[in-house]
Image (cartoon, rainbow, N blue to C red):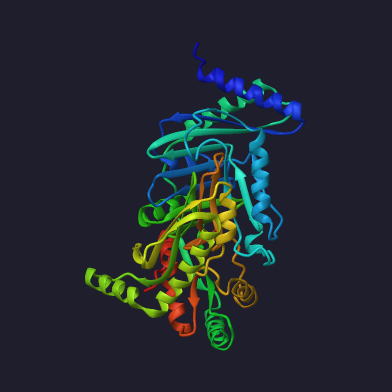
Amino acid sequence: MAISKETERFQGLAMAIQKAKNLNEQVLFSHIKKIECNNPLSFYQAGRERYKGERFFWQDPAKDITITGLGNVKKIQAAPNADRYREVEMSWIKLQNTAVTTGVTDVDATGPLLFGGFSFDYETNSSFLWNQFGDNLFYIPAFMLSIVEGEAYLTTNLLCSPDDSEKLFIDMINEREAFLTENLDDGEIPANVFVEQKEVEPEAWKKTVARAVEEIKTTDLDKIVLARELRLVFECSIDSKQVLEQLLAEQPMSYIFCLEAGGDCFVGATPERLIKKQGNEVFSTCLAGSMGRGKTEEEDTRLGNELLLDQKNLQEHKYVVSMITNAFEAVCDEVIIPSGPKLMKNRHIQHLFTPVKGTCKADTTIFECVENLHPTPALGGLPKEKAVTRIREIEGMERGFYAGPLGWVDSKGNGEFAVGIRSALLQDNEASLFAGCGVVEDSTPESEFQETGIKFNPMLSALGGKMNE
């Protein structure tokens, strides 16, 4: 005899509550159903008031997976130390060991899913700019829309306690699902009106680059990545949905992401995958060496060819390929790497690009991969530990989640993390944009300043600021 979907959901919820009573602890319950919804931004915007500060968005460059989360049934944060990856992973595993899931359970990126990220450097003291995020922040959403290979799925997550009742939860689920249906619209939102654009201590930053070049010439430091901040001011509080819309339209070859924490929102369009895990296959991207796009097809081709032959950029790229290869070999039985880089062309910038693929060992987890890979020489430098220490000492700003790993993992252990570059932190009516460059022995402060200027352009365009040439 067939069991109705509503009966299955009710029985699963009853099982989760009974587990909570038996274990005398909270148990995660998730229900997944297939729905009709082809606009994830409408879903995102439906939670603008009820779930503000507890929303996230993710889309990969191939558009295979789009995930939108609303609400927060469980936050996971670890202490800011070297064990943070393992602590987050163990908290997630503990929840999964008792979780109950019903509905459509055979689709990746649905069901119980953890989304969030880590700061670039756990040893950096927190600042006012990033105090809503802390060193790391992950959460399981109350509602999640997953569009996987063109099909839409709604996941409802609940954290059941020993004293909870099934009827109370069923009523709450029905109420919230009705709320989402009623609010899925595409109503007009007032534009983000740009007021002012401010460089943050540009001359001091150039002097820091010059000092770094001298240090590279006289010590064992081979490369250091230095980042800077650009600040935009708007008339009113910035609407993140509008920013996401622009990024989706203008940066189709990038990962589009946002993560809210309190009143702040970290948003961006990064071209750089850190790690993707699907079953026993893992994928990463070596992305280092960049140049602007040409105004004509001929100029663009010329610039691309120059990049492919430029020794400074090729050396930077070689560092990243070597490091990621070594990291993969530590956790993989087989690693596949092309013989040389290709060009990745985005709207405002082009990069040297080498994909890496591996077949990982049976016990390898995505958090282990994140720990092994972060930060790559494209984000930190070489030698890794010395470069990160010097960034901490001389860069002059706290990176927070900028250049850190951000992404998701599902209950099957599959997931994907990208690197949080080409990004901005939205705080009320201000946006802090971040961009960095690899400083090596033949770098010049002015050229690195211009390179970071180009790297600001994706977010400047999405926010309506003044573009850099």
The answer to whether 467 appears left or right of 259 in the picture is left
Q: Whole-percent x and y of residue 234? A: 50, 61
Q: Whole-percent x and y of residue 456? A: 45, 68
Compare residues 299 and 217 and report the one nearer the observer: 217
- Residue 224's place in the image compared with 45, above or below, is below
The answer to whether 408 appears left or right of 20 in the picture is left
Residue 327 appears in the rendering? yes
Q: Which residue is located at x 41 percent, y 75 percent?
A: 313
Q: Which residue is located at x 48 percent, y 68 percent?
A: 322
- Residue 39's place in the image compared with 227, above or below, is above
The answer to whether 335 appears left or right of 91 in the picture is left
Q: Hey, which residue is sitting farthest left in the picture? A: 298
- The picture quadrant where one finds residue 143 is top right
Q: Hey, which residue is sitting farthest top in the picture? A: 1
Q: Which residue is located at x 59 percent, y 85 percent?
A: 219
Q: Whole-percent x and y of residue 373? A: 55, 61
- The number of numbered badges drawn on the structure is 0
The answer to whether 238 appears left or right of 130 in the picture is left
- Residue 403's place in the image compared with 217, above or below, is above
Compare residues 317 and 125 and report the one nearer the observer: 317
- Residue 107's place in the image compared with 265, above or below, is above
Q: Which residue is located at x 44 percent, y 47 percent?
A: 189
Compare residues 293 and 92 and report the one nearer the observer: 92
**From the image, which quarter does the C terminus lie in?**
bottom left
Residue 237 appears in the rendering? no
Q: Whole-percent x and y of residue 296? A: 24, 70
